[in-house]
Image: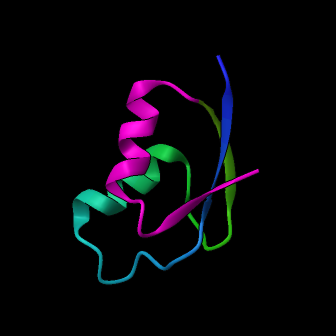
Amino acid sequence: MATIKIQQVKSRIKCPKVQKLTLDALGLKKMNAVVEHEATPSILGMVEKVKHLVKIVD
């Protein structure tokens, strides 16, 4: 399966707790952090929930 790189581009301050937990589950703890995951439906669903905080990096 394909892999995707996810970068956190906006701060988690003042975000709902659910979104903070989603970022933690993705492995994003700091601004500009980049993680690599398999492009599974569960990972893509988590990215969709926090799409205003992250971007997909090439």
Q: Is residue 24 above or below residue 9?
A: above
List the single residue furthest toward the front: 58
The foreground one among 44 and 12 is 44
The structure residue drawn at horizontal position 55% and vertical position 48%, both measured from the top left corner, is: 27
Q: How is the image coloured?
A: rainbow
Image coordinates for residue 46, horizontal then vertical, percent: 38, 44
Image coordinates for residue 12, horizontal then vertical, percent: 42, 75
The structure residue drawn at horizontal position 68% and vertical position 63%, both measured from the top left corner, is: 33
Q: On the rendered structure, is 40 left or right of 18?
A: right
Q: On the rendered structure, is 54 left or right of 34?
A: left
The boundaries of the magenta stretch are 39-58
Say if the magenta span includes residue 45. yes
Image coordinates for residue 49, horizontal then vertical, percent: 32, 53
Q: Is residue 9 above or below residue 25?
A: below
Q: Is residue 52 above or below residue 25?
A: below
The foreground one among 53 and 17 is 53
List the single residue furthest toward the right: 58
The structure residue drawn at horizontal position 41% and vertical position 69%, both measured from the top left corner, is: 52
Say if the magenta span includes residue 38. no
Quadrant position of residue 36? top right
The foreground one among 12 and 44 is 44
The structure residue drawn at horizontal position 58% and vertical position 61%, both measured from the top left corner, is: 55
Q: On the rendered structure, is 58 left or right of 27?
A: right
- Total residue callouts: 0
Q: On the rendered structure, is 57 left or right of 47?
A: right
Image coordinates for residue 1, horizontal then vertical, percent: 64, 16
List the single residue furthest toward the top: 1
